[in-house]
Amino acid sequence: MPVFIFEGLSVHYDVSGEGPAVLFMHGLAAERGQAQQTLASENNNQLITLDMPGHGETHANAGGPSSDLTGFEIYSRIALSLLNHLNIDRAILGGISMGSGIALHMALAQPKRALGLFLVRPAWLAQPARPHLNVIAQLGRLLGETTPEKAAKALAGDAEFQELFSGIPSAADSVLNAAKHRQISENPNVLSELVDDQPFGRLEDLAGINCPALVLGNNADPLHPPRIARIIAGSLPKGRYAHLPPRYLEAEAHGAALLTHFHSFLSAHSTALAHSS
């Protein structure tokens, strides 16, 4: 599988399909397979995915502290370096949760590189993702103290955790399953460092991103309150919000609606995409 070197770090990535480039990034405690599965039926574009440090097959450090390679700023630089490595000038930038934050950071850092933004269930504004991602940080703390199995069991038995995910067991499982990821269990500080980071300094900064943007949110999702997606969409000059069926209650309908919105977004901006390829 392809690897490129970023400041001595081997970063794993995949490219599939042909046509205009879509760089779609995974969420916190996930990996590039999540991004690939989300857009699995997309064949009319060049889909680019990668594992960020501390996720999937990309290690969290290259001989130094993992914190040196953790955060929206460094993840954004890595993603932009991948586009350079692939000789891609412009792309649709997007991702799930943390991936949305990275895409926004990239668009702010290099606006001309962003052909469009496709943001799915963003979880950060211009401040740490608290209190809604407190459980993610809590998992990181527990992983730093004990084994992944014991950490997941302790979190599952926490009264606040149970109340937060009452009636949404698949959402609870999504958090607990993060403990099984080798990179996360070996570098648990990645969780709290990302929760306490922020993808941009001020909400007003988003006014400087002038490309088309589609921001997707859903209900019954304690980790990704839809108000965050609505706020981001309303702060982007060409932003639009669309509401999906709940990911954790209607997974199949959620995925189908997401792809429908994605294809509509591509179709609406097909002329600009054609000129970029």
Image (tube, helix red, strand yellow):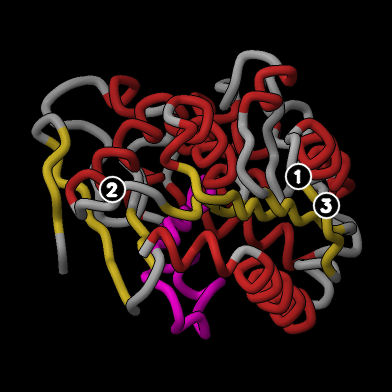
x and y percent of residue 262 in the render?
A: 65, 70
Residue 31 located within the stretch drawn in magenta:
yes
When asked about the image quadrant of residue 271, the answer is: bottom right
* Residue labelled with disc 2: 83
Label 2 neighbour load within 10 Å: few <14, some 14-19, many 20+: some
Residue 241: mark: 3
Q: How far is mark 1 from mark 3, CA to CA? A: 7 Å
Q: Nearer the viewer, residue 60 or 14?
A: 14
Image point (14%, 56%), residue name: 3
227, above or below 46, in the image: above
| x, y percent for residue 81 | 25, 39
Kindly identify which residue carries mark 1: 239
Single out the residue that lies furthest toward the top. Answer: 201
- The amino acid marked with disc number 1 is Gly
Span of residues in magenta: 21-46
Q: Is the C terminus in the top left, top right, bottom left or bottom right quadrant?
A: bottom left
The local secondary structure at tag 1 comes to strand
Mark carried by residue 219: none
Contact, CB < 8 Å: mark 3 with mark 2?
Answer: no
Q: Residue at x 62, y 47 (%)?
A: 97
Say which residue appears at 42% left-offset and 45% top-offset: 147
**In the picture provided, is 128 more to the left or to the right than 38?**
right
Q: Amino acid at mark 2?
A: Leu
Around disc 1, counting alpha carbons within 10 Å, would you say few (fewer than 14), some (14 to 19), or many (20 or more)?
many
